[in-house]
Image (cartoon, rainbow, N blue to C red):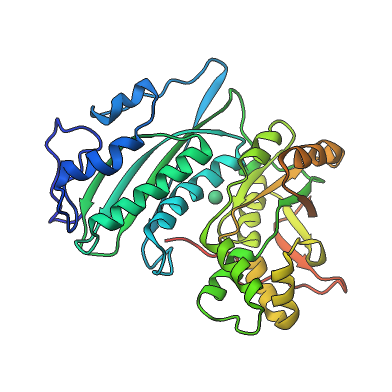
Amino acid sequence: MPAVASRPPPDAGPMAMPSPGASSLGEFGRIARYFAPLASSMPGAAGLTDDCATIEVPPGRMLVAKTDTIVDTIHLVGDEPADLVARKALRVNLSDLAAKGAVPLAYLLSLALPASVDDAWVARFAQGLAADQAEFGLGLIGGDSDRTTGPFVVTVAMFGTVPAGAIPRRGDAKPGDDIYVSGTIGDGALGLKAVRGQLPGLSQEARGFLADRYRLPRPRLALGQALAGIVHAAMDVSDGLVGDLAHICKHSGLAAALRWENVPLSPAARQAVAAEPRLREAVLGGGDDYELLLTAAPDAASRLAAASSRAGVPLTRIGTMAAGQGVRVVDADGRDVTPKVGGYRHA
Ligand SMILES: [Mg+2]
């Protein structure tokens, strides 16, 4: 926390935000106008008027918690409108909840904003939060805000619930499991390239599709919930398919063998890789897909297919887990095409 940070008075409540940037509203005006309307209707949120929120978990369910931070210019290109920043901050967290089969419930929000952030930015940021609160059934239960002399920082702590018992951990893969991914892989990494103007040979439609996939993650919540009790290991693909699968291998004490031709690509990604085969490395090793990566016993195939069609999101089998360690990707000719970079690491 920067030394110049001003802190709210101790009795000012969890959303008591000192005016962090250029504001004609003042500190409490900003909260009242932009954040108070986002308060969860849960009684434990106390309308954002108290120091702490409480979360009641229905009988037979347990709480799932996750936090993730977005730093301007590190996790963003820098041209994103504020509503998109807000939605991305919520969705990267929701994607992790999706992998565990959770139903989202509520979130905490912490902001560090430079003085250049004005009321109009905060207003649009709040609009983004409101849109996704409605889409995903969420409410705000508390938060904090400070000034920063650096780029803006948005931290969300997300809470959801799952049936009491086990959730699919990274270490739960079994030898002989099939490996699946949802949706398509590589659109996020290629979308970042498209946004940066690095895919000039692609059609405008393909570039637009990929850029949208990079800018606005689609957390696979319905699919994750439908997969509960069927899968062994599960996580979301946020840091790159190969790097994230390496985590499952490490924690399960197993190896993963993938076939490149089985990795599902969107038509736009297929077009990009056909034009420039070295982009295969970005597809396999790049981040920001926010699809689900999971392992399941071979005899679970029909139940996985049913869950996939119920959720309306495709699932594709891309390989198998076996004794050993590490991830290996081979092409149709049996050549090793494992990318050297094992996934993008967030700071
Ligand atoms: Mg993740």
Which of these two is toward me, 36 or 92?
A: 36
Q: Where is residue 219 in the image (x, y as percent from the top left)?
A: 58, 47
Query: In terms of image quadrants, where is residue 281?
Result: bottom right
Is residue 189 placed above or below 61 in the rendered structure? Answer: below
Q: Which residue is drawn at 39% across and 26% down?
A: 41
Q: Position of residue 266 (x, y in %)?
A: 72, 64
Residue 69 in sight here: yes
Number of dots carrying numbers: 0
Is residue 8 placed above or below 266 in the rendered structure? Answer: above
Query: In terms of image quadrants, where is residue 165?
Result: top right
In the shown orientation, is residue 246 left or right of residue 174? left
Q: Where is residue 185 in the image (x, y as percent from the top left)?
A: 68, 61
Q: Where is residue 89 in the image (x, y as percent from the top left)?
A: 43, 51
Residue 322 in sight here: no
Q: Residue at x 61, y 71 (%)?
A: 190
In the shown orientation, is residue 49 left or right of residue 165? left
In the shown orientation, is residue 120 left or right of residue 231? left
Q: Residue at x 39, y 69 (%)?
A: 78
Which of these two is toward me, 119 or 211?
A: 119
Query: In terms of image quadrants, where is residue 29?
Result: top left
Which image quadrant: the C terminus? bottom left
Which of these two is toward me, 346 or 54?
A: 54
Work out which residue is located at the far bottom of the displayed protein and give it. Answer: 201
